[in-house]
Image: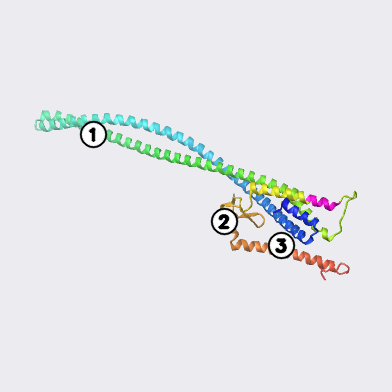
Amino acid sequence: MIDIITAEKVLDLFDKNRITARRKILQKVIHQVRHRRDWIQNYLSIVNILSLQFDKKHESLEKLICQLNDREQRLDQDLTKVNAQQRELERRQAHMQQELRSMRLLVEQLRDKKRQSESHYHRVASVPLLSSQSRKRYLKAHSRNAKAEQQLSEAREALEKCKDQLRTISNARSRQSMEQDLLASQRRGSLDAIQITQQQLVFLQEGSAFWTEFDDDQARVVLESAEYLIALDEKTEASNHEGFDINQLWLKTFRFACFEYGDRESEGLRVWGGPDQTEILFECAQCQLVCTGWPKIANDYELICSLCLESPAVNFMNDLMNRQSRTIESTSRLKKMMRNLFSYSKIEPFSPI
């Protein structure tokens, strides 16, 4: 850990002129600062990629919310129509049930008249004069009864159709109500997702601003002062024009920078945490799932989860990219060395022969 205690140790070793011990501590400081700066760059890259992911997610969620609102508005209109149809059918059903009761009474009366006419006709069938009149009354009663029976049957059928329509409308109303509840749940989920991602993005962007300032104001100064102090053993001491010892200035700078470094680093890790402590929501580019945790960067622009990072395909691609970058770097160094070797010759080492 880099803090005021580390700086005091280095200053004490300078006073005692213990070069090896102070060089060891300074090299450790340089290594830790470089490691922290690499971590900061990785953090900033992850936040930038997450910001792009969140922008796309917000856009898709807002479109989804608009679609849900439109669908819910149409459902409200349909439900209003269905409710009106249901009320009309219920009114018709009540009226038809009332008519059906009246028709049943009428049919019962006509049946009785029909039975009486039929009975009277059978009694006087052997009397020609009476049988003719009785037959007419019987046929008339039979016709009126048949007509009433037919009307009663039609009324029952119409009532059953009305009940079927009511059941259909009731089922449609239930489905629409369920869909409304589902749409409301989806909208709430989308709004909650937007709020969570916005809060997370604001939190990470605040962390980016903090670590960027830390990298420029603390890490850079500690690194430069440590590199200067470790180089003192390889050069002569220098002073400014007024005779002030510049080495003492660098020692004081190193001491104050280490104090600020330790204090600010502890604050940053306490508020924003490290990779093993911070859990965020992100979409893994490999498995296409929304994961919780701290992502890893693959192919310089993709975020992947820890499980996918262990997959052979991702490891192969990362090794291939690292190998290509090392090959390019080695080739560049070789060309530079060859040009330096032939710098006093008229031969261009990489020109075609």
Residue 197 location, x and y as percent? Answer: 60, 45
Residue 177 location, x and y as percent? Answer: 45, 39
* Residue on which disc 3 sits: 325
Q: Work out which quarter of the rendered image holds the N terminus and state it.
A: bottom right
User: Which residue is at the front of the view, 42 or 332?
Assistant: 42
Using the image, tell me which numbered label, if any, was put on residue 287.
2
What is the C-alpha distance between the residues marked 2 and 1? 75 Å
Secondary structure found at label 3? helix
Range shown magenta: 245-253
Q: Is residue 73 above or below residue 259?
A: above
What amino acid is found at the position of numbered circle 3 in the picture? Ser
What amino acid is found at the position of numbered circle 1 in the picture? Ala
Q: Main secondary structure of the magenta part?
A: helix
* Residue on which disc 1 sits: 146
User: Which residue is at the front of the view, 216 or 128?
Assistant: 216
User: Which residue is at the front of the view, 309 or 162?
Assistant: 309
